């Protein structure tokens, strides 16, 4: 009996031990799973990385939207653009710039910056959009996308500067045309940069730089039209193409750039290179910029003469902002095409063509839709002229990423908008590469491009 009882007890203890062991294993598994999923259990290094990423995003967004890099020295002190905006009635010159005029030249208004009282008045039609005083009120609210105004104690406009968002943001028109929530990274194809600059009371800095009279400068500025800007004009002085058309190029989007090697239509450099280039040489901020390629007196006579290849400002208001600015821009995704904007069935067929007989993916490699590596081509390789390529250091054209094409169809395609529609682009390559696409295949390919 004693031996049998011990055997019974032993069996009970074994069962209890097995149960405890299983429970322990379960707790360890659950704990390990929880530690993987819970940010609170991440390592100190991981927490620092996450915190740094969030801080960089916040700082980059602030810089992209609101930092002028001290370019008021050019837009206010030199060109005196603030006086034209204010108008004679408010201490400036001329009629002033009303909201109606501002919207007509493509400037946008951030509706989230407007107080409820103002939005209510706008909805009731009780705000005078033909009065420059309203524009000044919007500037005080920091509601004009890409334009920053500073005011004196008496309320008069002291200075204006521009930010990255002027050209590379728009709004969703959710309140009214030109008024809505910000869409950072979208190309503002309504923005008439030339017309805005031409408002300036003093164009002497530009006539001196280009070596021409004021009438010529105004003719050049007015030739750009909506959605275009000539970044190389102040480097080489070439205002018009050989065919007599403006040398200005389309404003590109600043989204969907992560994983893309070179940037701009002709691949001048990385995102941060171009940010430094634009902040110093185009926005005319106060910073440091170095690119000895601009010292070429034959290719870039103005840049070489003016020393644009080695700019050193004291204080430097740009360089410290570039890392976070780049981080934010690379984080902006290309927006998905809205439902109903393309035919899904045709787009599916177009995807097969894109990656097959149409040969598009040879250069536009998914998912970035540009080549990993040195994504540049000679003019001869893509069947177009070399005018714009010759204005760049490498004399080539970059394979532009295609995601978000649907957001910037206005103004055409390619660097200068030479192809009015996506169908025109397809026709060009169908002829150049002899792909012999059928009518239906061309239609399907267009739908796929619209879906990206």
Image (tube, grey):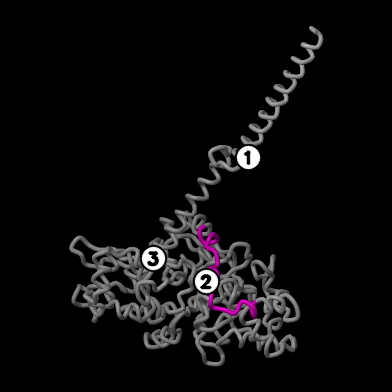
- Is residue 337 located in the magenta-colored stretch of the structure? yes
Query: Residue 31's image quarter?
Result: top right
Nearest-to-viewer mark from 2 and 1:
1
SS for callout 2: loop
Q: Residue furthest bottom?
A: 243
Q: What is the magenta range?
A: 328-347
Q: Which mark is residue 71?
A: 3
Q: Residues within 10 Å of mark 1 (few under 14, many from 20)?
A: few
- Is residue 125 located in the magenta-colored stretch of the structure? no
| Vertical position of residue 34 compared to residue 67: above or below | above
Q: 440 or 70, which lies in front?
A: 440
Q: Position of residue 406 (x, y in %)?
A: 54, 76
SS for callout 1: helix
Q: CA distance from mark 2 to mark 1?
A: 41 Å
Residue at 46% x, 79% y: name it.
227
Q: Residues within 10 Å of mark 2 (few under 14, many from 20)?
A: many
Main secondary-structure element of the magenta-colored stretch: loop
Query: Residue 70's image quarter?
Result: bottom left
Q: Which residue is mark 1?
A: 33
Q: Position of residue 4 (x, y in %)?
A: 80, 12
Residue at 60% x, 38% y: name it.
35
Q: 425 or 304, which lies in front?
A: 425
Q: Residues within 10 Å of mark 3 (few under 14, many from 20)?
A: many
Nearest-to-viewer mark from 3 and 2:
2
């Amino acid at each position: 009996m004693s031996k049998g009882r011990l055997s019974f007890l032993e069996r009970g203890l074994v069962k209890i031990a097995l149960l405890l062991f299983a429970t322990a294993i379960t707790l360890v598994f659950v704990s390990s799973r929880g530690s993987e999923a819970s940010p609170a259990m991440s390592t100190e290094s991981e927490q620092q990385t996450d915190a740094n990423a969030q801080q960089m995003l916040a700082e980059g967004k602030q810089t992209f939207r609101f930092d002028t890099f001290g370019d008021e020295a050019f837009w206010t002190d030199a060109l005196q653009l603030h006086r034209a905006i204010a108008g004679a009635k408010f201490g400036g010159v001329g009629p002033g710039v009303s909201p109606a005029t501002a919207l007509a030249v493509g400037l946008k208004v951030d509706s989230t910056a407007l107080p409820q009282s103002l939005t209510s008045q706008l909805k009731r039609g009780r705000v005078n959009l033909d009065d420059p005083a309203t524009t000044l009120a919007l500037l005080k609210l920091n509601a004009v996308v890409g334009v920053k105004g500073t005011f004196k104690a008496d309320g008069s406009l002291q200075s204006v500067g521009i930010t990255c968002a002027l050209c590379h943001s728009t709004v969703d028109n959710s309140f009214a045309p030109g008024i809505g929530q910000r869409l950072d990274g979208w190309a503002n194809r309504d923005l008439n940069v030339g017309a805005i600059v031409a408002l300036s009371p003093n164009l002497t800095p530009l006539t001196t730089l280009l070596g021409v009279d004021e009438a010529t400068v105004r003719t050049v500025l007015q030739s750009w039209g909506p959605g275009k800007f000539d970044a190389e004009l102040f480097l080489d002085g070439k205002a018009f193409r050989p065919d007599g058309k403006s040398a200005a190029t389309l404003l590109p989007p600043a989204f969907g750039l992560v994983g893309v090697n070179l940037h701009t239509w002709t691949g001048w450099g990385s995102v941060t290179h171009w940010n430094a280039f634009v902040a110093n040489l185009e926005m005319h901020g106060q910073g440091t910029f170095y690119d000895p390629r601009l010292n070429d007196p034959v290719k870039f006579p103005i840049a070489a003469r003016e020393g644009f290849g080695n700019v050193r400002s004291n204080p430097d208001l740009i360089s410290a902002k570039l890392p976070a600015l780049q981080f934010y821009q690379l984080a902006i995704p290309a927006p998905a095409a809205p439902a109903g904007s393309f035919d899904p069935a045709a787009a599916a067929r177009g995807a097969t063509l894109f990656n097959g007989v149409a040969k598009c993916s040879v250069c536009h490699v998914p998912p970035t839709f540009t080549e990993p590596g040195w994504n540049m081509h000679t003019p001869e390789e893509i069947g177009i002229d070399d005018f714009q390529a010759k204005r760049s250091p490498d004399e080539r054209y970059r394979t532009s990423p295609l995601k978000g094409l649907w957001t910037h169809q206005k103004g055409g395609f390619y660097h200068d908008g030479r192809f009015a529609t996506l169908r025109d682009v397809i026709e060009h390559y169908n002829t150049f590469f002899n792909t012999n696409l059928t009518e239906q295949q061309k239609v399907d390919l267009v739908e796929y491009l619209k879906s990206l």
